[in-house]
Image (cartoon, rainbow, N blue to C red):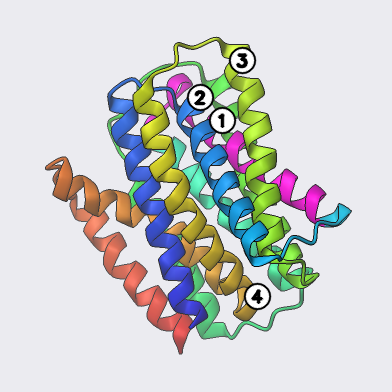
C-alpha cells in the first residue's frame, strides 16, 4: 500500500511541476504561485484539523514542519534562478540527484535494511531520473559561478528536506500537524519573498496556486503515509521520478517529442521499480 502512496506522490508532484512549466512559459511569477499554493494548502489542512479535532501542535512539529516548508519553497526558487543563470541541460539532472542524500540518510541514520537487488533498483531509478531530465544543446547563459551556487543551494534544500521528512515519521510526529506547519512556514517565507521582490500580482497566479495547493495536500499526505509505513530508501527514488510525469505531459499537452535517451530512461526506471519490489 505504501508503494501505491509513493506513486500517488510522484504523480501529484509531477502534475504540479507540469503546471509550473506551463505557467513559466506564460511569464507568471513562480514565487506568487507558490505563495498561493502554500496559503491554500495551509487553510485546507488547518480547516480539516479543526473539524477533525486533531490539532496537537508541539515545538518539534512546528520547527521541523516550518523548516521543511521553507526548504521546499527555497529549493524551487533556487532551481528557477539556476535556470536563468546557467546551462539548462545540467540544472535539472543535478538538482534531481538530491534524492541520494535522504536515501543514504535512511540507510545510515535510520538503519534501514536494503537488499543488493533493491540497491540496484535504486541506482536504476536515480540514473533514469537524471537521464530523463538531461537536455543536450540547451546550454544558454555563461554565468557558471552564480549558476553552480544556485544549484548547490537547491540540492541541499531538497536533500535536507527529505531527511527531515523521514525524521518526522521516525519520531512519530502527527502528519497532519506537520503538514499544517509545512504550509504555514512556507507561506510566511514566500510572503516575505513576494514583498521583497515587488513583482506585479496577477489573478491567474492565485487561481493556479490554489489548484497546485490542493494537489499538493494529496501528494504530501501520501508522502507521509508512505514514509511512515514503508522503506524511505525506496520511496525517495520513486518520488524523484515525478520528472517522468512532466515528460509524458509535455508529449501529450505540449506536443513535445520524446528523445531516444529519454525512452531508455523510462524503461530503465520501470526496471528499477521492479527490482525495488522484489
- Position above or below: 168 against 133: below
The residue mark sitting in front, 1 or 4, is 4
Which of the two discs, 4 and 2, labels the residue nearer the N terminus?
Answer: 2
Which of the two discs, 1 and 3, labels the residue nearer the N terminus?
Answer: 1
Residue highlighted by disc 2: 81
The CA distance from mark 2 to mark 1 is 5 Å
Near-viewer residue (78 or 188): 188
Residue 84 covered by magenta stretch: yes
The CA distance from mark 4 to mark 3 is 37 Å
Q: Secondary structure at mark 4?
A: helix
Which residue is pictured at 53% across the width and 51% down the height? 97
- Residue 2: give x, y in percent of width and height: 52, 79
- Position above or below: 112 against 244: below
Q: Residues within 10 Å of mark 1 (few under 14, many from 20)?
A: many
Say whether marks 1 and 3 touch (CB < 8 Å): no
Residue highlighted by disc 3: 195
Q: Residues within 10 Å of mark 3 (few under 14, many from 20)?
A: few
In the image, 158: left or right of 53? left
Residue highlighted by disc 1: 78
Q: Residues within 10 Å of mark 4 (few under 14, many from 20)?
A: many
The residue mark sitting in front, 1 or 3, is 3
Amino acid at each position: 500500500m505504501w508503494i501505491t502512496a509513493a506513486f500517488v506522490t510522484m504523480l501529484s508532484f509531477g502534475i504540479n511541476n507540469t503546471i509550473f512549466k506551463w505557467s513559466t512559459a506564460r511569464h507568471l511569477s513562480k514565487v506568487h504561485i507558490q505563495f498561493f499554493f502554500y496559503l491554500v494548502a495551509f487553510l485546507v489542512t488547518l480547516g480539516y484539523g479543526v473539524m477533525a479535532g486533531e490539532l496537537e501542535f508541539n515545538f518539534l512539529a512546528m520547527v521541523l514542519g516550518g523548516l521543511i516548508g521553507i526548504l521546499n519553497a527555497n529549493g524551487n526558487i533556487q532551481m528557477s534562478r539556476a535556470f536563468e543563470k546557467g546551462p539548462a541541460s545540467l540544472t535539472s539532472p543535478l538538482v534531481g540527484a538530491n534524492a541520494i542524500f535522504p536515501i543514504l540518510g535512511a540507510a545510515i541514520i535510520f538503519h534501514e535494511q536494503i537488499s543488493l537487488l533493491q540497491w540496484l533498483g535504486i541506482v536504476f531509478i536515480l540514473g533514469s531520473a537524471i537521464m530523463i531530465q538531461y537536455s543536450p544543446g540547451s546550454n544558454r547563459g555563461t554565468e557558471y559561478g552564480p549558476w553552480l551556487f544556485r544549484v548547490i543551494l537547491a540540492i541541499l534544500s531538497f536533500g535536507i528536506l527529505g531527511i527531515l521528512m523521514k525524521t518526522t515519521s521516525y519520531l512519530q510526529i502527527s502528519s497532519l500537524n506537520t503538514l499544517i506547519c509545512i504550509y504555514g512556514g512556507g507561506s510566511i517565507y514566500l510572503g516575505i519573498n513576494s514583498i521583497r521582490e515587488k513583482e506585479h500580482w496577477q489573478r491567474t497566479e492565485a487561481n493556479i496556486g490554489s489548484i497546485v495547493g490542493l494537489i499538493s495536500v494529496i501528494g504530501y499526505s501520501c508522502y507521509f503515509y508512505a514514509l511512515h509505513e514503508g522503506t524511505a530508501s525506496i520511496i525517495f527514488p520513486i518520488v524523484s521520478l515525478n520528472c517522468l510525469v512532466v515528460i509524458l505531459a509535455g508529449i501529450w499537452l505540449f506536443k513535445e517529442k520524446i528523445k531516444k535517451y529519454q525512452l531508455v530512461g523510462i524503461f530503465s526506471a520501470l526496471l528499477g521499480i521492479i527490482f525495488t519490489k522484489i
